[in-house]
Image (cartoon, rainbow, N blue to C red):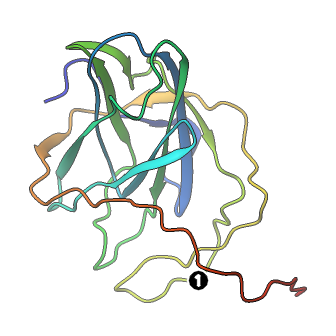
Amino acid sequence: MFKNAKPVWAKDYKNEKNIMLEFTANMDFIGENAKIKLTADALYRLIVNGNIVAHGPQRAGKGFYRTDEIDLTHKLIAGKQNEIKIQVLTYGLVSFEYVLQPAFLLAEVEVDDKIVLKTAKDGDFTAKRILSKVQATERYSFQRPCIEVWNLPLEYSENLELFELGEKAVKPRTAPQPELKVKPFDKLIAKGKMNI
């Protein structure tokens, strides 16, 4: 399913709980068709040129990972530098919602049947930890992992050293990919500031 990509994660965060890494790569889009194949341990969010394009992956049983294949042709700007970001959240906890497995990202971008970006130890993506996501938070319950707590604006670590994990048992997505449509709000009712 993947031609050149290898599953990777940050060496310093191999067994951490409730953290998010952001993988970034830039590419010039010269071609007719572009697509990305990707999967991750728990959750990913794909952002192309600042726009959220997809999230996933579809869940699978322990030891298996569903792969999303997303058409990027109309998301990329031809002849220009394009930024691909993949934010990956790992909980690193046992729950009914997610299986406890090693954290990783596996991704590759293909333009006209040629791999132009890939994850690997010496791949095209750099990784940083999103420090604004608070790591030590309460759990909802055993059914669900940690609550979301953020300190904004976003702050990042320096680039992290990546390492490759072993091969992953990947399967294609079987459920439809969710549509992410932007619906502008109708009117602003109120705004304010809260101090705690």
Front residue of this view, candidates 174 and 135 = 174
Left of 14 or right of it: where is 100? left
In this picture, residue 174 sits left or right of residue 156? left
Residue 78: image location, x then y, percent:
45, 18
- At 26% from the left and 21% from the top, the residue drawn is 33
Residue 168: x percent and y percent? 20, 39
> 190 or 18, which lies in front?
190
Q: Count the numbered circles shown.
A: 1
* Residue 158 or residue 26, whichever sits in front: 26
Q: Residue flagged by tag 1: what amino acid is it?
A: Glu
Q: Where on the picture, by quarter, is residue 192?
A: bottom right
Q: Which residue in the rendered view is the most extreme toward the front? A: 186
Quadrant housing the C terminus: bottom right
- At label 1, counting other C-alpha atoms closer than 10 Å, the crowd grade (few under 14, some 14-19, many 20 or more) is few
Q: Residue at x 51, y 29 (%)?
A: 162
Above-or-below relation of 106 to 191:
above
Q: Quadrant of the N terminus?
A: top left
> Which percent across, then down, holds residue 79?
49, 12
Residue at position x 55%, y 68% in the image: 184
Secondary structure of residue under mark 1 = loop
Residue 43: x percent and y percent? Answer: 39, 57
* Residue located at (25% from left, 18% from top): 4
Image-quadrant location for residue 190:
bottom right
Q: Is residue 107 above or below residue 88?
A: above
Which quadrant holds residue 109?
top left
Q: Which residue is mark 1?
A: 138
